[in-house]
Amino acid sequence: MPEQAQTEGTGAAASAAPGRVSADGAKLSEAELRELQQLQQRDREVRAHEMAHVAAGAGLVTRGASYTYQTGPDGQRYAIGGEVSIDTSPGRTPEETLAKAEQVRAAALAPADPSPQDRQVASQATRMAMDARMEIARQAFERGDGGGPATGRDTDGRAREGAGGTAADSASAYVARQARSAYEVAAASAAAARPPGLDLMA
């Protein structure tokens, strides 16, 4: 959606009492007054929604809030929709990716009423965090501090074997346990993956 944010403000009009005169100076009808009140309420909700995204996504927001407007019967423009672009690309390390994913999810769900698009972004962030946790667990296992065998070899360099099979089997089982654990955390978030640079919409 093209960026439509304007330097001219509609906030003052949105917070003012309902106008009584139309753009051409005529008195507003009851229907027009109701429409104006609805537009003012929508304007407040949209701006609060997008500002919640911006606040929670600080550092990851690639483009500030942009709005689409509708002109009210009083001639003023009111925000009826908006979006905030946020960076969802992976970090340089699994730990950085995990922290980033958690912030993206928090930013997506920050408004009181997340939109369907917001929930899709949150789902992607949950999967991103799951993948990062699995990679962190894999690296920890390879370093020998992940709760499994340190190297999978005896002092003479031969692969260690036990009741459960070779060290490679143990490593596979460990990674499988980590994957299952991460999957269970993210099982409720199953939307299709989306590319980096998503929009959080009102």
Image (cartoon, rainbow, N blue to C red):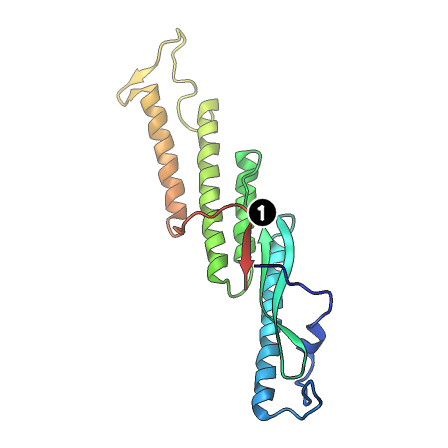
Quadrant including the C terminus? bottom right
- Tell whether 117 sits left or right of 14: left
Residue drawn where x is 34% and y is 21% of the image: 168
At which x and y percent is residue 46?
59, 68
Count numbered badges in the picture. 1
Camera-side residue: 176 or 122?
122
Dot 1: few (<14), some (14–19), or many (≥20) neighbours within 10 Å?
some
Q: Is residue 113 above or below residue 162?
A: below
Quarter occupied by residue 45: bottom right
Estimate the x, y position of residue 48 in percent, counting from the top left.
Answer: 61, 66
Front-most of residues 137 and 35: 35
Q: Position of residue 79 (x, y in %)?
A: 62, 70
Q: Amino acid at mark 1?
A: Asp
Q: Residue at (45%, 23%) from the top-left corner?
A: 142
Q: Which residue bears the numbered disc 1?
A: 87
In the picture, measured across the screen, residue 59 lies left or right of residue 127, that is: right
